[in-house]
Amino acid sequence: AKCKKCGYEVTPLKKWLHMGPPLCPKHTTEMEPIGDWEEAITTSNEK
């Protein structure tokens, strides 16, 4: 996930993707998902 305002990036664990994108620690705004989160969520739920 990446912040649209400052460019801060973080890689969340698959098990937390169903919660949605994390918040930027600086701006407290929702970060933009990067990559295919839907596929990762589906794969994570199958385990």
Image (spheres, helix red, strand yellow):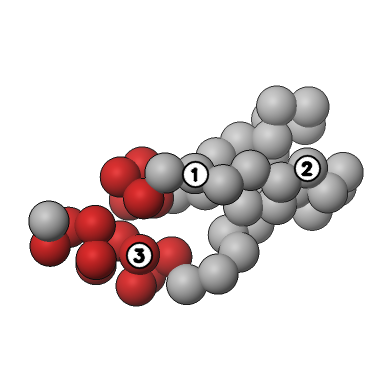
| Image: 5 above or below 46 | above
Q: Amino acid at mark 1?
A: Pro
Label for residue 40? 3
Q: For residue 47, which quarter of the picture? A: bottom left
Label ID, residue 34: none
- Could you say where residue 25 lies in the image, as x and y percent from the top left? 70, 27
Q: Secondary structure at mark 2?
A: loop
Determine the image quadrant of residue 24. top right
Q: CA distance from mark 3 to mark 1?
A: 11 Å
Mark count:
3
The residue under the point 36% across, 42% down is 16
Vertical arrangement, residue 4 with respect to residue 30, above or below: below
Helix, strand or loop at label 3? It is helix
Marks 1 and 2: in contact by CB < 8 Å?
Answer: no
Q: Residues within 10 Å of mark 1 (few under 14, many from 20)?
A: few
**Separation of residues labelled 3 and 2 (CA atoms):** 21 Å
Q: Is residue 19 visible?
A: no
Left of 11 or right of it: where is 16? left
Q: Which residue is mark 2?
A: 8
Q: Mark 2: which amino acid?
A: Tyr
| Residue 31 placement, left or right of 5 | left
Answer with mark 3 or mark 1, whichever residue precedes in sequence: 1
Q: Which residue is mark 1?
A: 12
Q: Farthest residue toward the right? A: 6
Q: Is residue 45 left or right of residue 19?
A: left
| Residue lying furthest front | 47
| Identity, as a three-letter code, of the amino acid under mark 3 | Ala
How crowded pointer 2 is (Cα within 10 Å; few <14, some 14-19, many 20+) is rated as: few
| Residue 17 point in image, percent of width and height | 39, 50
* CA–CA distance in space, label 2 to label 1: 13 Å
